[in-house]
Each structure stands twice: as structure tokens, then as C-alpha cells.
Amino acid sequence: APHASIQTKEIAQVVDLIVIPTGQSVDDLEPAVLLAHDLFKSGIPIKNIVFALMKVTGSESEIQSAREYLASTPYQVLNGAIPTKTSYSQALDVGKSINEVSFKGLHNKADELAQSIIDAVAELV
């Protein structure tokens, strides 16, 4: 939702890092940024809120545009981006994680984003 519910705010108070997944279109980005602002206004430090680009197309220019849009906010954007791929859906359907796909390139994309999350948490500690 483009706003933080009471439950979202309660959870945000006890976690180290809030990762907000968003697509690359403005229709995805705007509500994600509104959610981040809402969390910040409820007392969550800016450094604890990050964005992850998910279900992106293969267009590097569109991904870069999304990154530029998010760069105009005070929040960090994680490295990497997860494209919309059948292989990811199929892995999830059988209880695997997205980095357990059989295609090395997709596996590497998932690992890049995961490492970026690990790095962001490490910076907070």
C-alpha cells in the first residue's frame, strides 16, 4: 500500500532495515516513496529505509531512470535489480529462493541484490 499501516509501523520500529520493493515505472515508484516518507514521519531513521528494484524489464535505460528518480529522495537504492523472469517464479513455486534458479546470470542478479541488503545491514551495526 502507498501508506504505512499501523502494523507496518509497528514492525518497522523493531527491525534493523526496511527494504521497500518497487518496480521501475512511476506508478510503482511514487507509492513506494510515499510509503518511505510515511515511515520516516513515524520515526524511522532515513538510513534504515532502502529501496530494491524488483520485477524490472530488461531495459537498462528504464532501470537507470528508476534509479535517478529514487536518487532524488533521501533514501538509499540497493545495488542490483531483479528482472521479471519465469525462472524466478518457477523457483518460488517449488519453495526455492530466487538465487536457486538454474541460470547463472539470474542467480548472479539475485546474489547481487542479496549482498547489497547484507551490506546495508552491516553499515547500520
Image (tube, rainbow, N blue to C red):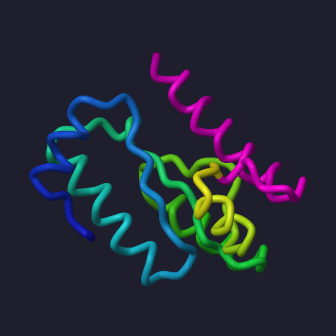
Residue 59 drawn at (x, y percent): 77, 79
Seen from this angle, which residue lies furthest left? 6
Whether residue 2 is situated above or below residue 38 in the rendered picture: below
Q: Is residue 95 left or right of residue 86?
A: left
Report the number of numbered marks.
Answer: 0
Q: Which residues are drawn in magenta?
A: 98-125
Q: Give how far across and how far down residue 119 sits, in percent.
A: 61, 29
Which quarter of the figure has residue 53? bottom right
Residue at x 21%, y 56% (from the top left corner):
38
Question: What residue sits 37% from the left and 28% below the top?
Answer: 16
Would you say the magenta stretch is mainly helix, strand or loop? helix
**Side (left or right) of 10 relative to 30:** left
Q: Is residue 104 above or below residue 17?
A: below
Which quarter of the rendered picture does the N terminus lie within?
A: bottom left
**101 falls in the magenta region:** yes
* Residue 42 belongs to the span the image colors magenta: no
Q: Tell me: 107 left or right of 77.
A: right
- The residue nearer to you, when weighing 17 against 66, is 17
Residue 37 picture quarter: bottom left
